[in-house]
Image (tube, rainbow, N blue to C red):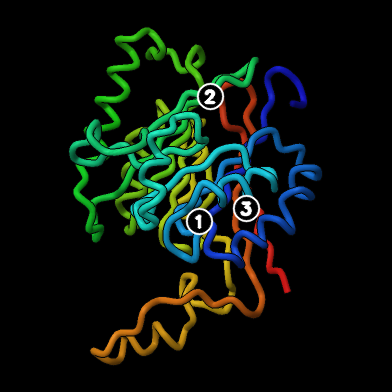
Amino acid sequence: MQDSRNMNVLFIGDISARPGRESVKDVLSNIKQHYEVDFVIANCENAAGGRGVTRAILKELESYGVDFFTAGDHVWAQKQFHEDLYDLNLPIIRPLNYEGNAQIPGKGYKLIDLGDKRIFILSFLGQGFMREPVRSPFWVFDEWWNARVDEGILSDDKSSNPLIFIDFHAETTAEKLTFGWYVHSRVSAFFGTHTHVATADARLMGDMAYVTDVGMCGPYNASLWVNPSITTNNFMFPMKEPYKAELEGPRIFNSVLVTFEGKEAKSIKRIDKILQ
């Protein structure tokens, strides 16, 4: 790190299918070097063919320079990965606010010790227009916070707490903004994901970095990561076609870089690239 107080964190939007993984491979090393990035987080829930992720793909993305992974509702798409989620040494979390949270594989948060800094990373699913059986992220965050306070890990003095990052995997801008404002006095950075469409509102809410949606890494000439001819058919006709990733053409890489001084976020900026 640049010094014991400063830290640069890169969050990469939903990595989608092979074009998304290739985008990370092609640009991440140079971005890390140019911006002196200390820690990289990526949402990986679409990395395996557009739905889900595998242990092998996690290792592939780690080899490109990603340190830790978040996931959303598609983390369950690859059945063989369900058992892998019981391995709490894997650098990945799934959403915390599922009903029956303690009875499903994986964990919804992780405390990472980087030596001179500690980081909590949490994942939540939104409720608006989402189909998953989840509880309110507002109430679940408060429950998580109060449990960590009881354990003596967190306090009302933000300067003494670990950094806290949230990946909020949700559909609506209103729910993301509202949840951001709700947690901004307690959280260090808030990264919206899920829509695959990068938003232009990266900003500070007090000393918390915020963006409504980081965007994605994947095929540029696509709808989400899907060939547009398929999505066009599915909007127009009742005879639906299965989604297939668009594997040809240019690719997009969406991310945000947050700079911290001590426990306060001082800036957040988009780092976006179109790759031919």
Q: Quadrant of the C terminus?
A: bottom right
Q: In which quarter of the image is the N terminus?
A: top right
Which circle marks residue 172 in the picture?
none
Indicate whether 223 appears above or below 47: below
Residue at figure coordinates x 42%, y 62% from the top left: 51
> x%, y% of residue 153?
41, 12
> x%, y% of residue 201?
51, 54
Question: Circle 3 — which element?
Answer: strand
Label 2 packing within 10 angstroms: few (<14), some (14-19), many (20+): some
Q: Give how far apart the Cα atoms at labels 3 and 2 are.
A: 24 Å
Of badges 3 and 2, nearer the viewer stands 2
Q: Which of 201 and 224 is in front in this view?
A: 224
The numbered mark, 1 or 2, whose residue comes first in the sequence reads 1
Indicate whether 49 appears above or below 32: below
Q: In the displayed structure, does residue 269 sit left or right of residue 131?
A: right
Q: What amino acid type is highlighted by mark number 1?
A: Asp
Q: What amino acid type is highlighted by mark number 3?
A: Arg
The residue labelled by disc 2 is: 112
The residue labelled by disc 3 is: 270
> x%, y% of residue 33?
80, 42
- From this viewpoint, is residue 133 visible? yes
Label 3 packing within 10 angstroms: few (<14), some (14-19), many (20+): some
> x%, y% of residue 178?
31, 45
The numbered mark, 3 or 1, whose residue comes first in the sequence reads 1
Residue at figure coordinates x 51%, y 46% from the top left: 55
In contact (CB < 8 Å): disc 3 and disc 1: no
The residue labelled by disc 1 is: 14
Q: What amino acid type is highlighted by mark number 2?
A: Ile
